[in-house]
Image (cartoon, helix red, strand yellow):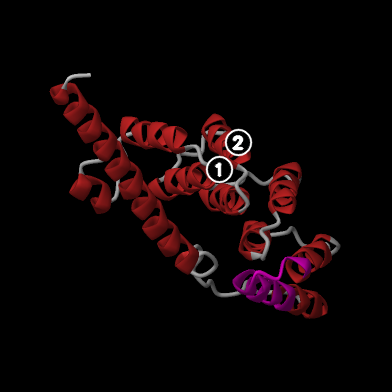
Amino acid sequence: LSSRARRWCACASLSMMLRIVALVILVARSNAAFRQRLPTTRYRQRAPPAVAAEDAPQVADSSSRQQALSEAAKLGDWESALARLDELSETSEPVPPRAFDDAITACARAAPAQWERALATLDRMADSGLEPREYAYNGAMAACGRVGKWEEASQLLDRMVRAGVAPTQCSFNTAMAAMLRGGRWEGALNLLQRMRDRGLVPDEVAYGIGIA
């Protein structure tokens, strides 16, 4: 190769390295923000509905189980979270979507992440007649990504789209993190392009280095 060609190859390699580093920073920063919001910003507190006196103990018991499930999610205590979910399923009251979301979050935050249980809980949510939304899908993708299950995370993103649930920036970033942990940086860059194709704006870090 001529000296000019060698310089061009070196510059191209450096450019690609900068793109990969930028993507790593992008995903890490976005995932950190996602983890901070996981159990707390998804729902607003509502006033409890009026209940008959004979039903009050059951409602109070369900409420305490949901609270315990949410606490387990914050701690990544997947065993307690799934146990509380089972208890809620045994009552006559319908299991709220938040209970499934929190159980999936607990699986994602566990050490190591319980990705198979997160996927099973997502399926269980759908089987119960509830439609998983972005929060549940993102939690399941996070569980897969933490243990390098990039194929499963990518499949969840596709499943999310097929179900009519619009992926958010957080959804794509979570899937990209899984790709990177699995050593699939080209796949992560492809997801970044898919993100832009859907009209989602990448993080400012991406623009700062020129990855977008």
Kindly identify the amino acid type of the residue bearing the numbered disc 2: Glu
Identify residue for label 1: 182
Q: Is residue 13 magenta?
A: no
Q: Residue furthest front?
A: 2
Residue 195, quarter of the rendered image: top left
Across and down, in percent, residue 169 comes to 38, 47
Label 1 Cα crowd, 10 Å radius (few <14 / some 14-19 / many 20+): some
Q: Is residue 66 magenta?
A: yes
Across and down, in percent, residue 102 comes to 63, 63
87 or 139: nearer the eye? 139
Residue 64, quarter of the rendered image: bottom right
Across and down, in percent, residue 58 comes to 80, 75
Camera-nearest label, 1 or 2: 1
Judged by its main secondary structure, the magenta piece is helix
Label ID, residue 135: none
Q: Relative to residue 161, is residue 106 depicted above or below?
A: below
Instruction: Give the mark nearest the N terminus, 1 or 2.
Output: 2
145 or 170: nearer the eye? 145
**In terms of secondary structure, where does tag 2 sit?**
helix
85 or 180: nearer the eye? 180
Identify residue for label 2: 151
Is residue 97 toward the left or the right of residue 185 in the image? right
| Extent of the magenta region | 64-79
- Residue for point 86% across, 62% down: 90
